[in-house]
Amino acid sequence: MKDTKQFKDMKILILGLAKSGYAATKLLHTLGADVTVNDASPYEGNAEAMELRSEGIRVICGGHPDGLLEEGYELIVKNPGIPYSNPVVMEAVRKGIPVWTEVEIASRISEAPIIAITGSNGKTTTTTILYHMLNAAKKQPLIAGNIGTVSCAVAEKATAGNVIVLEASSFQLMGTDSFRPTIAIWTNVYDSHLDYHGTSAEYIKAKAQISKNQHADDYLIYNADQEELRAFAAQSSAIKVPFSLKEKLEIGISADESEIYWNGEPYINRKIIKLPGQHNLENIMSATAAAILSGCDKDSIESVLSSFAGVKHRMQFVKELKDRKFYNDSKATNTLATKSALAAFDTPIVLLAGGLDRGHTFEELRPFMGNVKAVVTLGETKNRFAEFASSCGVQMIIHSKDMEDAVKQADTISQKGDTVLLSPSCASWDEYQSFEIRGDAFIKAVMSL
């Protein structure tokens, strides 16, 4: 961590605890800031709030008291999940008080260079692949951000000998000011989180923060197959490194049916790659480009690609049972992700799908439903997904009571050579607190068969 005095004696309000608020509070208190925590949950049973108060930190729980922002705060650090429609955030913006997420703090204190990855899909897989490549090449990587480890806590321990690989969501990036990664990756962009951002334009604007402060000696790796990202890259000051599945690039990284090319020259034979799916090839290309730019040797890159089989809850192979393979793709919370999952298999598929009903259409899946022999529906959208599947010609459609029942039903109707795939195409919040918990329920049910 840098020897920084920038937060000393600064009056800071932490809005929302959870992991990021707790870590930011501890760090800023250590750096000499005058910190107040405001968390909506009750104080009783709030272990983090109790601990922070015992350390002499002011903690206000149970809601936002009137006049909170009349106390002269110079900075607000908010939990990424708190929307900008929150009354305290809206009032802070009106008053001109900076509103950050802890990612901004991490970038200000980190001695280690930061490689940041964002995108509508593929962030976690790309982050994980790149981390393993850097680790194999002995670059001392640390993993952070939306993948589950709070960025500022990682940056606090990082040295100049490390490199931080940071998965950055639109929620996190929207709360940045001077954040500057040495390498930025933007995997793709599709409409997502519009209930938070309001419009596609605002969502893209938040994502674009990843390269806003990059210099001419930094790198931007981006999906050149998307017009929106080509337009975004044209405005960046960084060195552009495009990736493409549609054309062979003379500058950047691209692929055809047999090879991955770096600057137009064959670099890796695709036969060695273990991770299935065309969408994962995009993740592999962007991670490989970042690894090359970070000085990783080819042997280290190839060793990871020949062994890496996926991230938990993202096209995760769970078990083979009676010549049927079970895959957990609980992270597929939108149709784009499920579309990619369906395209990855050429075997008959028993699809487990459904979840929180946000009113979105499933039509994008229609061209990819040809291999789906049966559907087991889940959650709030079970009826709508059943109607859609029926319109696609799926003959066998079963409604389930819960995940255990869904897996048992899929086990009963599947046959040798089939793929049983949980890829819900919906968020989990109708029945589960997170896609991870939903995926764990699937894994538990499969393992109990």
Image: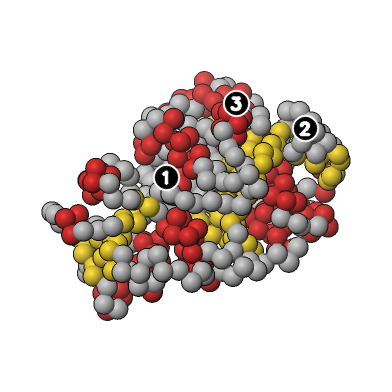
Q: Earlier in the sequence, mark 1 or mark 3?
A: 1
Q: Position of residue 140 (x, y in %)?
A: 67, 67
Mark 1–mark 2 Cα distance, whole angstroms, equals 32 Å
Direction from residue 118 to residue 35 in the image, left or right: left
Report the residue at 56% width, 69% height from top: 158
Q: CA distance from mark 1 to mark 3?
A: 22 Å
- Label 2 packing within 10 angstroms: few (<14), some (14-19), many (20+): many
Q: Which residue is mark 3?
A: 227
Q: Mark 2 or mark 1, which is nearer the start of the sequence?
A: 1
| Kind of residue at disc 2 | Leu
Q: Which mark is residue 249?
A: 2
Going from the N terminus, do you reach mark 3 or mark 2 first?
A: 3
Could you say where residue 328 lies in the image, as x and y percent from the top left? 58, 49
User: With respect to residue 111, does 67 lie above or below?
Assistant: above
| Residue 415 visible here | no
Q: How far apart are the two marked residues, 3 and 2, measured between alpha carbons?
A: 16 Å
Q: Quadrant of residue 31?
A: bottom left
Looking at the image, residue 383 lies above or below residue 129 = above
Apparent side of residue 50 relative to residue 376 in the rendered image (left or right): left
Q: Which residue is mark 1?
A: 174
**What kind of residue is marked 1?**
Met
Q: Position of residue 411 (x, y in %)?
A: 59, 46
